[in-house]
Image: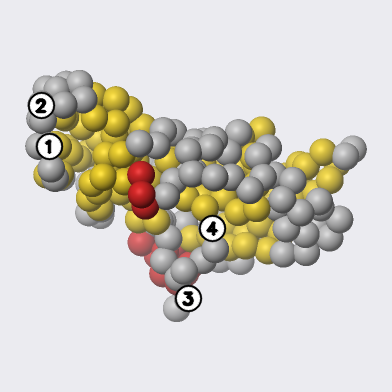
Amino acid sequence: MSTVESSAAVAPPIGQQFNLAVSNDSTAEINVMLFASMGGGQPVTTLVWRSLRLVPQQAISFGWTYTLNFVLGAQGQLGPGENYDPVQILDAVPGVSNQITLALVDGHLQLVDARPGPPGTLLIRQDDDLPPFSGNVGVGIDGLGTFITNVQPSTQQGFGYAPQLWIGTGTFEQGQMMSTMGINTKAALTFPAGVDHAQAAFDGSSWSIEY
């Protein structure tokens, strides 16, 4: 079984609702980041998926729906802390529209020709005539970007259905390109099968997560 097929096998059902309660039990304000990671050493850029600021002793709960997306951004060759600037977000439905093509339409980058793709992967094919580094293209969860790659003509990139989610503290905000230097702490968010609620508490140095 390939990496992407393994990812699909453990992915939650499309449309499943999740809820996360985050509390800052420290004595300082923190910037909380949620982001994803993908195995296999693929050459992709990681974005901050969600972010929020919490003052000491503050708690916030929020939810999301497990849906998959293709995303197109206007910025090419991002540096850490730069926003990928989304200009198009499309649903990616496994077995229905999990393959997309990046094309030039009237001189502008556009995601087109959504169709069923290889099982277990979100596949992006880039046309031959695209200007290199003229933007970025990738995938997301619940309408927000998680991974992108530069526009490169005549290439294709596959992404798994179920990347590992993380919660951490650091300097980056939602939609920005990350680097490891901007991550102060992190802990894996791994919802057991059938579980859709979690509590994450930060004590000033590390995270405690309960499901």
N-term-proximal mark, 3 vs 1: 3
Instruction: Please tell me which residue lies in front, 14 or 23.
Output: 23
Q: CA distance from mark 3 to mark 1?
A: 39 Å
The amino acid marked with disc number 1 is Gly
Observer-nearest of 116 and 161 = 161
Disc 3 crowd, CA 10 A, few/some/many (<14, 14-19, 20+) = few
Residue 134 percent across, percent down from the top left: 74, 46
Per the image, label 2 sits on a secondary structure element best described as: loop
Q: Position of residue 160 (x, y in %)?
A: 48, 60
Mark positioned earlier in the residue sequence (3 or 4): 3
Residue 82, position in %: x, y? 53, 37
Instruction: List the residue tagged with mark 4.
Output: 44
**Would you say the residues marked 4 and 2 are in contact, meaning their CB atoms lie under 8 Å apart?**
no
Q: CA distance from mark 3 to mark 4?
A: 18 Å
Q: Secondary structure at mark 3?
A: loop
Give the mark nearer the N terminus: 1 vs 4: 4
Pinpoint residue 176: horizontal percent, then vertical percent.
Answer: 48, 38
From the image, tell me which residue sits under label 3.
2
| Amino acid bearing label 2 | Thr
Specify the amino acid type for callout 3.
Ser
Residue 120 to residue 181: above or below: below
| Disc number placed over residue 27 in the picture, else none | 2
Q: Quadrant of residue 18?
A: top left
Element carrying mark 1: loop
**Tag 3 and tag 1, C-beta contact below 8 Å:** no
User: Do residues under tags 3 and 4 come within 8 Å of each other at their CB atoms?
Assistant: no
